[in-house]
Image (tube, coloured by chain):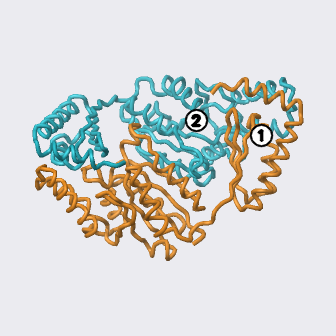
Chain colours: A orange, B cyan
Amino acid sequence: MSDLRASIVVIGDEILGGFVHDTNSHWLAGQLQTHGIPLDRVQTVPDTMAAIDEGLRMELGRSRPRLIMTSGGIGSTPDDLTMEAVAATLGRGLVVNEDIDHRITLALEWTAGTGATVTADHERAMRRMARVPEGTYLLQGARGVAPGVALDVDGGLADGGVTIVILPGIPGELKRIYSDGIVPELLAGVGTPQHVVEMTHGYPESSLNPVFDRLVAEFPDVHLGSYPGKQCTIRLKGERGKVEAAGAVVRAYLDELDDDPGANELKTAWAARWTD
Amino acid sequence: MSDLRASIVVIGDEILGGFVHDTNSHWLAGQLQTHGIPLDRVQTVPDTMAAIDEGLRMELGRSRPRLIMTSGGIGSTPDDLTMEAVAATLGRGLVVNEDIDHRITLALEWTAGTGATVTADHERAMRRMARVPEGTYLLQGARGVAPGVALDVDGGLADGGVTIVILPGIPGELKRIYSDGIVPELLAGVGTPQHVVEMTHGYPESSLNPVFDRLVAEFPDVHLGSYPGKQCTIRLKGERGKVEAAGAVVRAYLDELDDDPGANELKTAWAARWTD
């Protein structure tokens, strides 16, 4: 399963409205990177059935095996539509998950135990959270009433298909489920860790273009990224031996620049000019 | 043009790799919200022609008039492919933009003036940044060599079509171009400012479900969001009068809870239980 790739669908009007800064997709991207699983796309979509469906279909159509993670939209309020949307996209029914229903029963008992009135309306809204697409199973690590769950399409990851993991939007819960549920239950032994070499330099990004052209030609398997700034970052990623060799080429080029009085003048001028 | 809607395509392997946390889409989302322009989707895509093309086509197919903003991938290094990708998707040629080419000439003169050697390779890589899709025009506010540009599809925003704005990934430059270029040049007089009412409360989110059901039934035009936490946030958005009326219903319900000893016990227990 070394060719496993991932997609993320973030669900939330609050993010598209600019009210909440999504941190989940960035955190998940970093975890996948560490695990050596390439992330192909992040989509942030509104809380509507049609928008979630469009995003899911797009990701379901990509290469397999594939891990699709969703974040958000699994609470008890009317704008929480992820479960319904996943079921509709897959053409599956919604069924009551007994584990989740049991958590809800305990939560309602806890609420009643505090002295609050649990109305029929309150219970109905809470029980809504137990309805999941057919075939859904609970992942470890979820302490909340709306826990992390997964479901397999075409056999799931184990059989070269797709596993959809539905995660809560609350960052602390999402992180626990990823670490305690997804990694041991779905990703054990999976992934090809990538070797990463990062270098920074104080020259304008464009000064490095000659060596970048050389890298592209000589090291086609090494993934090159260059990120401008007062201090620019160069990131090389891929198989360790090739990344080390490509990194040595860049370091030699930077040494040349450091020995060149003209290049050093440029570096000083660039630092003085940089305003942001 | 009050039905103008927006999409964002963020381009960058460094974001999907978890190395860089994209802040541009969150910032743009907030600006669009303030302007009353709904944002339909954010896609974060890798630095490949095929991935950018897929994202652009998806957003070009949505309702019009539409503003599509891209962020990133317009520098001088080999991984900067946004201009080529936009041109390919639209079936337009790449042409030299004289304004950008002039900026590059000045940048090369500045580099040479510092005492650095400007090689033919260096100049060739820099000149690459002046190649833009046919019909591209410069926006105000860009101080960099790779500035913000725009191009119109089917007449652009002014004629009910699409305007694509290509923005640099560097946050400070993107913000300047949005404020100094996009707002005055493309969005003047556009947008229907939305009224937003936010309320916070210390009850479990599910305690509010009865009033949420009432809102959905009685105020179908008011957009409701509920965001759980130790302090939950309720956000109502829409036409001012309706939002105020819906907000009054929620406030009355919260007052009822505050007067209910059982509900207050629940609030205290919830605060004590909340761990994240």
| The label number, if any, that marks residue B267 in the structure image | none
Could you tell me which secondary element the residue under label 2 belongs to? strand
- The amino acid type found where label 2 is placed reads Leu
Image point (53%, 69%), residue name: A64
- Any part of residue A200 in sight: yes
- Any part of residue A51 in sight: no
> Residue A135, image x and y in percent?
34, 72
With respect to residue B43, does B127 lie above or below? above
Going from N to C along the chain, the mark reached first, 1 or 2, is 1
Asked if the residue at tag 2 contacts the one at tag 1, i.e. Cβ–Cβ closer than 8 Å, the answer is: no
Could you tell me which secondary element the residue under label 1 belongs to? helix
User: Could you say which is closer to the camera, residue A4 or residue B94?
Assistant: A4
In space, the residues marked 1 and 2 are separated at their CA atoms by: 19 Å
With respect to residue A116, does B30 lie above or below? above
Residue lying furthest front in this view? B272
The chain under label 2 reads B
| The label number, if any, that marks residue B125 in the structure image | 1
A98 sits to left or right of B117? left
User: Could you say which is closer to the camera, residue B242 or residue A155?
Assistant: A155
Residue labelled with disc 2:
B167
Q: Quadrant of the N terminus of chain A?
A: bottom right
Q: Quadrant of the C terminus of chain A?
A: top right
> Residue A17, image x and y in percent?
38, 38
The quarter of the displayed image where residue B72 is located: top right
B53 sits to left or right of A69? right
With respect to residue A223, does B198 lie above or below? above
> Residue A121, image x and y in percent?
13, 53
The quarter of the displayed image where residue B254 is located: top left
For label 2, count other residues whose C-alpha is less than 10 Å away and answer few (under 14), some (14-19) or many (20+): many
